[in-house]
Image (cartoon, grey):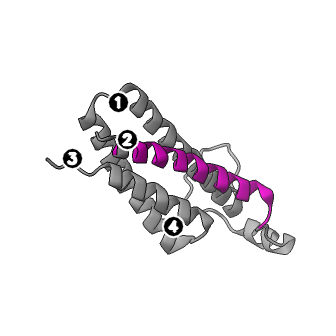
Amino acid sequence: MPPRQVWLFQLGCWVAFTTAVVHVAEHVSGLNALAPETVADINLLRATYVILIPGLHQPTFLSVLNGFSLSLALLVATLGAAGLVVLKYGADQPLLLRGVSRAFAIGTAMLLALSIEGFFSLQTFFMATMALCFALSAVSQEG
């Protein structure tokens, strides 16, 4: 892979980490915290799409939402870490790097579409940058 594409792939990986950090920071900062009465109303809702395990408590809708939110940050950080590992140990294998770039580009583009559709926020900017970096690093070398 040309150095420019390797650099873009690496940048995409670091933007993935940044996306995760921004997401967790917003989650724990409480900047967008709900009013206590809203939380009480939401906690009355049942998360009906969760398959219960006998003997465990029924999670609230808000606890399931928080769990999925933090899972998104963890998975995006894992995507960045996996990319850096592939880059470190597969730098001399351009087909591997290009294949991983394409897979990451498709996945992050779909994540971007979901973000725009469902929860447009600051993280959407980072997701767009990440998807663009992976897409540009996946372009075949001309020649």
User: Considering only vertical position in the picture, is 93 above or below 127?
Assistant: above
Magenta region includes residue 19:
yes
User: Considering only vertical position in the picture, is 46 above or below 140?
Assistant: below
Disc number at residue 138?
A: none
According to the picture, the residue beneath numbered tag 2 turns out to be 6
Q: Residue at position x 70%, y 62% from top?
A: 62
Give the CA separation, mark 1 to mark 3.
15 Å
Give amino acid for label 3.
Gln
Mark 2–mark 1 CB contact (< 8 Å): yes
Which comes before the other along the chain, label 3 or label 2? 2
Which comes before the other along the chain, label 4 or label 3? 4
Q: Which residues are magenta?
A: 5-31
According to the picture, the residue beneath numbered tag 1 turns out to be 91
According to the picture, the residue beneath numbered tag 3 turns out to be 141
Give amino acid for label 4.
Ser
Residue that extends furthest to the top in the rendered view of this protein: 89
Q: Position of residue 138 (x, y in %)?
A: 30, 49
According to the picture, the residue beneath numbered tag 4 turns out to be 115
SS for dot 4? helix
Give the CA separation, mark 4 to mark 2.
26 Å
Q: Mark 4 or 3, which is nearer the eye?
A: 3
Which comes before the other along the chain, label 1 or label 4? 1
Mark 1–mark 3 CB contact (< 8 Å): no
Which comes before the other along the chain, label 1 or label 3? 1
SS for dot 3? loop
Give the CA separation, mark 1 to mark 4.
31 Å
Q: Residue at position x 33%, y 42% from top?
A: 100
Which one is in front, 5 or 96? Answer: 5
Which comes before the other along the chain, label 4 or label 2? 2
Q: Position of residue 52 (x, y in %)?
A: 59, 50
- Residue 1: name its quadrant: top left
Give amino acid for label 2.
Val
